[in-house]
Structure formats: C-alpha cells, structure tokens
Image (cartoon, grey):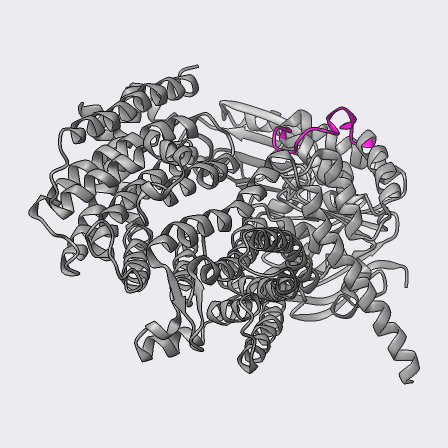
Amino acid sequence: MTPSLQVMEYHLVNYRRTWRASVLSSLVLPLLTMLGFGVGVGAYVTGGVEGVDYLPWMVPGLIASTAVQGAIGESTWPVLSSFEWVKTYFAQSAAPLRVADILGGHLAFMLFRVLTSVMAFLLVAALFGALRSPWALAVLPIALLLALAVAAPVAAYTASVSTDMYLAILIRFAVLPMSLFSGVFFPIESLPEVLRWVAFVLPLWHGVDLCRAATLGIDPGPGAVWQALYLVAWGVAGWFLAHWRYRGRLVI
Amino acid sequence: MNSLIHARGLIKRFEGFTAVDGIDVDVRAGEAFGFLGPNGAGKSSTMRMIGCVSPPTDGVLRILGMDPRRDGPRIRARLGVCPQLDNLDPELTVRENLTTYARFFGIPRRVARARADELLDFVQLSERADSRVEPLSGGMKRRLTIARALVNEPDLVLLDEPTTGLDPQARHLVWERLFRLKQQGVTLVLTTHYMDEAEQLCDRLVVMDGGRIVAEGSPRALIETHSTREVVELRFPTDDQSGYADKLAGIGDRAEVLPDRILLYVGDGDDALAEVHRRSLSPASALVRRSSLEDVFLHLTGRTLVD
Amino acid sequence: MLTLVLPRRLVGLEGAARRSASVAQRNVDALKTAYWLVMLGGLLEPVLYLFSIGVGVGGLVGEIALPGGRTIGYAEFVAPAMLASSAMSGALSETTFNFFGKMKFMRLYEGMLATPVRPIEIALGELSWAMLRGSVYSAAFLVIMVLLDLTTPARALLAFPAAVLVGFAFGALGMTISTLIRGWQDFDMIGAGQFALFLFSGTFVPATTYPPVLRWLVEVTPLYRAVDLIRGISIGTLGPVQVVDVLYLLAMTGAGLLIAGRRMERLLCR
C-alpha cells in the first residue's frame, strides 16, 4: 500500500503546477453546461421530466458525466505521456516499485482528481437549489466507483497504443457517444431499443441513474445494488486488464 | 564581384544583447567555408541571416548578389539549408520528406521523385525510403536533412553544426558525404565547434568569439600564424597545476595552464620533454602532439572550444 | 511604368498562390489510414449532437416559437447551430492545436521558411487546408439535414457557402490566436472559450431568452453571427440582419489573416 501512496504523492506534487488549468476544464465547463443547458433549455421543457423540473433532473446526470470526463482526461494523455513522452513510468519502475504500485498510485491520483471536482460541482449545484435530498452526499462514492469503472479500462487501452491519434479515436467514437446517449440530457427510454441496450452495457448510464436517485432522494430499490456491483465489475476487470498491459510494457 | 556571400559590418541584435557584432565575410564560389567558435559565439545567428530567415539589424549583406531584405524568396530558392536541429516532418515517410519539400521550391512532382531517389542513394538511405522518420538513427536523420537541403540543386549549402550530437561513426559518414559534395564543386558554408571537423572540411574559416571574428584563414595558415608546430601536454599529480607553471618557465614559446593539465607550445616536442625531465619534474602523463585549431582558439580567446 | 510593374506583381501573386498550395499539399501527403478515422470522427460529432440534443432533448422541448409567430421543431432549430459550431470547431482545431504543434513541436515551418515559401503563404496554405477539410464536413452534414427533412435542398445549397465563410472566419481567428499562444496550457483557455461560445450563441435556445445585457454580449460574438446566418438560411427567414452577419464574418477573416501573417513573420523570422 505504502509504495502506491508514494507514487500518488509524486502525481500530487506534479499537480501543484497544473491545478489552475485543470479547474477550468473540470469545474468551469460543467458549470457552464449547467447554466447554458440546464437553465437555458430547461426553460423550454415546460412539462418537466419524469415529474421533476429539468434542471434538478439533469444536474445529477451532469455530475456523473463530469466524473467520467475527469477519469477519461486523466487516463488518456497523462498515461500516454508517462509511457511515451515523459516516460515517468519507466523512471518509477527503476525504483523498487511493482507494476501494481505504479498503476495503483496513478489510479488513486485520478480518483482524487475526480473526487475534488465532483465535490465542487455538488456544492455549486446545492447553491442553485438543484439538489433535492441529503442523500445527495451519496454521489461522492458513486462518482468514485464510476470513475474507477472508466479510468481502469481506459488506462489499459492507453497503455496499448503508441500515438495520441488512438486517444482521439477513443474520445470521438466511444466517449462522446456514451456521454450524449446515457441519460444525461434526456431519458434513455426515448432511445431506440438497440441504443438503449448499448447504454445499459456502458458504465455511464448506471452512474447517472444512481446519482439521480441520490440527488432527487428517490428510493432506487434493490436494482441499485446490482448497478453498483456492475460498476465494480468494470473497475475490477479494468484493473486486471491495465495491470496486464502495464506489465507488458514495463517488465521486458 | 565573385562572392556568393558578402558581409560588411554585419550586426544582429536581440533585445538586450548583440549576437553578431560587426563581422566582415566573403565566401567564394566552390569553396568550403567554416565558422568556428564555441556555443554562443554568434555562428547560428549569422547562418540564419545568411539563410534569409532573420533580417540583419545593421550592416551590408549580399547573398548571391541579392539583398536578403528584398529578395528573400528568390535567394532561398537557390540555397540549401541543414539546420542545427533536424526539423524533418514526422508525419511523412523518408521519401515524402524530400518530394514534399521539393514542392515548396515549385519543382514538378515527377522531377522531385526522380531527384529524391537520386539523393536517397547519395546519402545511403534508399533502403529506408518508405520508412517513417521517427525510427531513424540520429545519423540517418542528419543525412536525410542534408539530402533535403540538396533537393533544389542549390548554389550554396548552409550546414549549421552538421555533426553535433552524432556518434563518431555517424560523423565520419556525414563528413564523407560532405566531402563528396565539395569535390562536385558545391559551395559549402558550415558552422562547427569541432576543430577536427573544421580541419577536415574547410578550405577557409573564420574563428568567432562573442559575436566577432578573431582570426581568418585556411586551417593550416591559422595554426602557423597563431600557434607553434608542436604541443606538449603535461599532467601533474596535483589539484593545482598552476604550481608547476613557474618550474616550467623558459621551455618553449609559452605555456597555457588548464584546470587539469599544462600545455607547452614548442617547436620540437621531444626536446622540450627532455628539458622537463632534466628539471627533475615528473608529470603523471606527458604527450607530444601537433598544434590544432583548438590551440589557435585557446591562444586567441584564452578559452577552450568545447566546455 | 505601370505596365511594367503590374505583370511583375501578378507573377508574384501566382508564385504566392502556388507556394500556399504546396503548404496545403503537405497535409494531403501526410494523410495516412488512421487519420481518415480521425476525420470521420470529426464528421460524426455534429451528427451525434444533432441526434442527442435535437432529437432526444427535442422530445422534451417540443416546438420553438420564432419571433414572427411561426413555430418549428427543436431539431430544425438546433441543426443549423450544430453546423455552424462544427465549422467553428473544425477550423479552430486545425488552426490552433495542429498549427501550434507544427510550429513549436515539429518545427515544420522552420524547414519551410528555408525555402522560397513566406510566412503569409504558410498561413494561407494551412487555412485553405482547414477549409477544404471543413467544407467536406459541412457538405456531409447538410446532406444529413436534408435527409432528415430539417431543411430543403435549395436552402442547403445556399447554406454551404455560408458554412465555408464561417470556417474561414474562425480559421483566420485561430491563426491569430496561435501566434499569441505561450504554451500548451493555453489550450485549456481556448477550449473553455470555445465551449462557452458553443453553449451561449443562440445554439440551444433563442438568444431572446437571455437577460438583456447577456443578450447584447452574445449578439456581438462571432458564433452567434454564424448561427444566425446559417439558421436564417436553413429555416428560410433571411433578412437584412443576415447581411450584417456576412459582413461581420468577412471582416473577421480579413483582419485575422492580416494580423496572423504579420505576427508569424515576427515569430519565425527573428
């Protein structure tokens, strides 16, 4: 455990130089979306959604989406750079660190980044009156779970490619469609059957659904446990995949 | 006027400092001309002015009889430039780097392709023609950059530190290719801080220091004028070599004390060494060699070329 | 005297055009299989937004009332804005991120400037490449709009040059920005600015919804003018205000190119 913390410490020290820029992308952009979209378009959604006003309905989705964006952002370019450009991982593997420490420490840092931006977002959402229940605090562990479910497999993907062109392809063909069709902006019930199943398979919708139940204070029923476990499964499978890919590049 | 490059009182100033401080240069057709000097001497700034990508602050500069301020594109059409740091296109193959570059000169595609094949042959990269640039070794990249500089059949080739950062074997391969070009009558202008490179390639050179020219001539003439025939290098087993300088007084023309050794400038090295032993001094090591441009530079500036 | 000077200038112009074209040509040469996939992704983006927001959220919003009293479907309202935004983001990504990468990271322009190519010709060459690429995207998106019955073929034909103009204006702006960028960290700022424009340019709701001050602010931003122009064409409400849009975008193109060419000269030919 301690070696992972040392790796995480390295990333935290590095983060001291760049945190200002990251505030912009991880907080200001989702806030703008909330204002421009939630408030703006919300005014035109006269009937509300599922019995709730549009803004409080879409805010939990936006929080889950923010967690995913943060996780993706940290598990793509920074990971590729650690392998290809700055080669941080190789420097670390020259120290008495195991692959699991290097991967674990970096993932822990990614989760830390997601946690801070989700906390900030939650605070602002509360100020806008978009949270309907004290259960909203449950969003924090849900966001962490969701972030791990995304960051681990994506880190495995990044560790398998050599140029950032493949990252652009991932973002455009997987991340963007997932963000747009996972019930963040409109209920997935209005999607065609096939696309609805795609949303079920991908992790984001489960995170959105759980967050929504939390901020609206709706009892999600026993299905929530299965959804959480499904996210755990993504995270665990992602961890093993990433460990295997990292090992393939670091231990040669 | 026969000079391909003609400079009088050429000055380049950046905010706060003067990189080139009034130099006079004439380069004639067919010769290999060198700028020798340490890092920061103003060699690269001079090259960029000659390459018409950096306007002179003051002074006269004529390239191929034209004014770089007015005729930049027309002059550059007849120059070949090999920059200090390779700026090959990483998104293109080796051959495409030449053909695409040829298009910037308005060379028709078919001509460009034929010339690319010829040049790849010349720099011994034919087998890598369809490879990406990335995996090439440093020496291969430099040879490709040289080939690229030749794609427009230039009247004048500018080479900024052509072998800096290459391993000895790669350097010799580059030198050999440049030597071939020289034999074909191509005018070469190069900068270097390696005295062996300057001695091997240059018919004539100027020694630069602090933006000024401190000496000019052929490598041999420079050595004859500014140094003795031979040099004795002595290392004494001590932290402070200067303590021995007094004890060596009177041997040869003069002595230079460096942190790790003492150089004695003499006509005959063996005689001088015998004299050292006669004074019952016992250096840890002693070496007799011929004078080089390094010694010229040391004598003129009191500093070594490579630090 | 004049007759002597004029042909020489024309020859000069022809040379400049040829050299600019050779700069654009370099990008065609660099196209490899995987890049096509990235380009396809660029085409996909506005389509995905159209389906998600226009169709998905459109199901919640219903119809949008226009100032004249006419109402149109939400997808019909959003589609032209997606076209304008994608013309903007395509032009900006090519002229900021890619341009900066070529200038600072690959140092491509140093190599080009050792040839007869001049800075302004590099700017023009890169811009025409961005436009070529953007035009393909715009044309494809317009075809989709027609297929989904969100506009008529005749309007789509007129909207095409408008989308190209939008690309030119943002491309020129992007080049100017590129010459002012200090490092990669500035791209976060550009991205944020771009995203704010994307959200607040009358894209998803009519600008008339905003409070007066915000509304005036929005109406002077370039993407608002671009959306206004293309929407005016695609839903058939062209009026004198669209002439203002066109003039605005033309002025932006001219000013951008002028400043970018000058600044590049200073940056690269020190």
- Residue B160 image offset from top left, x and y in percent: 68, 46
Q: Is residue B94 left or right of residue B90?
A: right
The verdict on residue B191 being magenta is no
- Residue C133 image offset from top left, x and y in percent: 63, 52
Residue appearing at x 48%, y 28% in the figure: A161
Extent of the magenta region: B122-137
Q: Is residue B219 left or right of residue B38?
A: right
Residue appearing at x 71%, y 70% in the figure: B59
Q: Nearer the viewer, residue B45 or C123?
A: C123
Q: Is residue A13 visible?
A: yes
Q: Is residue A68 left or right of residue A215?
A: right
Q: Quadrant of residue A175?
A: top left
Q: Nearer the viewer, residue B224 or A98?
A: A98
Q: Quadrant of the N terminus of chain B?
A: bottom right
Q: Main secondary structure of the magenta part?
A: loop
Q: Nearer the viewer, residue C206 or B90?
A: C206
- Residue B65 image offset from top left, x and y in percent: 85, 64
